[in-house]
Structure formats: structure tokens, C-alpha cells
Image (spheres, rainbow, N blue to C red):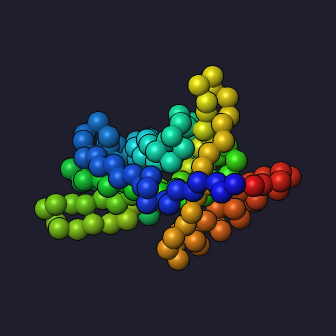
Amino acid sequence: MTVARKNPSQSETIKTEVVCPNDTNPMGILQGGRLVQWMDIAAAVCAQKHAGKICVTASIDSVSFENPARLGDIITIKGKITRAFNTSMEVIVEAWAANTLANSKNHISTAYFSFVALNEIAKRSTVIPVRPETPEEMEQYEEALRRKKRKRPDKELA
């Protein structure tokens, strides 16, 4: 029996936000926690689109803040599934800040989110495997297994 698989592009999610005063610190710079919240929402939508089920955040790994975003910037967040395991999935989330007046765009953050799929009684549920297509997706697919093994060296992973 052949198991159905989904391409990462089928669940890719793009979220857009504008940095408002309530999102910033006293210097007018986007708060890291607010950005992580937005990234988590994008990642959750991506995971749920892939699994066709409610998914909850299990962990966030390797969050990096590379450039600041400022008041008025337009934030674009892209979530893309890298790999599905038995009941969990990894989603890479990248964020960019665009300043319309300066005509500039900067990469501001990357993070890896892990999600667990749940059934209708909130118990772990199996998910559809990922079928990477591009060289970048294939590399991310392999890297996801390495990241999971580093986190859980005592577990057998599928």
C-alpha cells in the first residue's frame, strides 16, 4: 500500500503584519516576543494545513534575530514544513522586514518549530509524510532528522 505524501509547497504559509506602536520597545524596535508569536501562528497554520488536523507547538529551536524591525515596517513571515515524523512535524519559519519609505527589505529571523498533530480527543495523531521536491527541500528534510536526533538521541525516530 502506498502512503500518500504532500509536497512542502502544499502547506506553505505566508503571514503579513505591520509593526505598530504596541509591538515595539521604547526605541521603536519590534519586540522579539511579538515576532516569535507571529512566527508561531504562521508555523501552526502551516502544520495544520499539512496534517489536516489541529496541531500544537511542541518546541521552538534555533531562533535567531539577525536584524531589527522598526515601527511601521511590514513584516512578512513564511512557514514551510521540512519533515513529518510519526505524529510530529518540523516547520522552518523565516521573517523579513520591509521599510516602504526606504525601499529596503531585511531578513530578521529564522526559527524551527516542532508541532504535534492531535485527533478529536486531543491525543497524538499520525501525520502525512512530506515529499520534498527541490534540492533545498531535500536538504531541509535531511537536516530535520539530524536536528531531531540531536534533541532526542535516546528515541528511535521515524
Q: Is residue 29 visible?
A: no
Residue 76 in the image: state x and y as whole percent. 32, 55
Is residue 5 positioned above or below 32 on the image?
A: below
Viewed as shown, does residue 93 lie left or right of 151?
left
Task: Depth check: give the residue in front, 157 or 152.
Answer: 157
Is residue 21 positioned above or below 81 on the image?
A: above
Toward the left, the furthest residue is 101
Residue 5 in the image: state x and y as whole percent. 57, 56
Q: Is residue 120 visible?
A: yes
Residue 64 in the image: state x and y as whole percent. 51, 59
Toward the right, the furthest residue is 154
Q: In the image, what residue occupies the spot 43% across and 60% down? A: 9
Task: Depth check: give the residue in front, 102 or 3.
Answer: 3
Toward the front, the furthest residue is 1
Task: Depth check: give the residue in front, 25 or 100.
Answer: 100
Q: In the image, what residue occupies the spot 69% across and 54% down? A: 1
Q: In the image, what residue occupies the spot 63% across and 26% down? A: 122
